[in-house]
Image: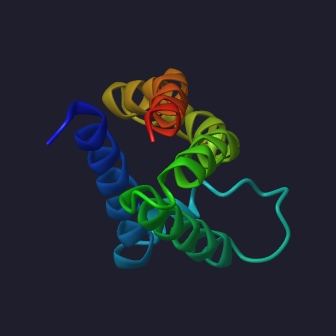
Amino acid sequence: MSTPNRSARLLSGLLLGMGIAHFAMPRPFDTMVPDALPGSARSWTYLSGVAELAVGAAVASPRTRRAGALAAAGLFVAVFPANVQMAYDWRHHPKPLRAAALARLPLQVPLVAWALRVSRDA
């Protein structure tokens, strides 16, 4: 398996795994939904789970990989406010949890770059 193909499969697996997690254990995702969004947090959790599943499936297929990877980059940018919300909400949690919440913020940059690289290689 070529490195670009392996990278695409890994990205797809990450997205599919996170999409499944939104349904299997939605409560942690609910807490990250910014209050400014209309509707229930659970609805946004499920909607983002569906988006991750759809994008992960698109990245998995060579025929839709380029568009799927571009959608993944957009999705990673779109969920950044939830990561900011989590970092803010967890500011009074124990230090290891605060550190994990803060570490998520700069991790969005390599995720976006990874998705763009998969798109270019498709």
**Left or right of 121: which side holds 51?**
right
Question: Please, is residue 4 above or below residue 21 in the view?
Answer: above
**Residue 48 image-quadrant placement:** bottom right
**Residue 77 location in percent, x, y?**
66, 39
**Left or right of 111: which side holds 24?**
left
Which one is in front, 6 or 26? 6
**Left or right of 94: which side holds 27?**
right
**Residue 53 location in percent, x, y?**
46, 69
Q: How is the image coloured?
A: rainbow
The residue sitting at 54% across, 54% down in the picture is 68
Which one is in front, 91 or 23? 23
The residue sitting at 45% across, 42% down in the picture is 122
**Residue 105 location in percent, x, y?**
54, 27
The residue sitting at 54% across, 47% down in the picture is 66
**Residue 45 image-quadrant placement:** bottom right
**Residue 88 location in percent, x, y?**
63, 35
The residue sitting at 52% across, 21% down in the picture is 106
Question: Please, is residue 46 above or below residue 67 in the view?
Answer: below
Q: How many marks?
A: 0
Which one is in front, 52 or 117? 117
**Location of the N terminus (image quadrant):** top left
Question: Please, is residue 118 above or below residue 56 in the view?
Answer: above
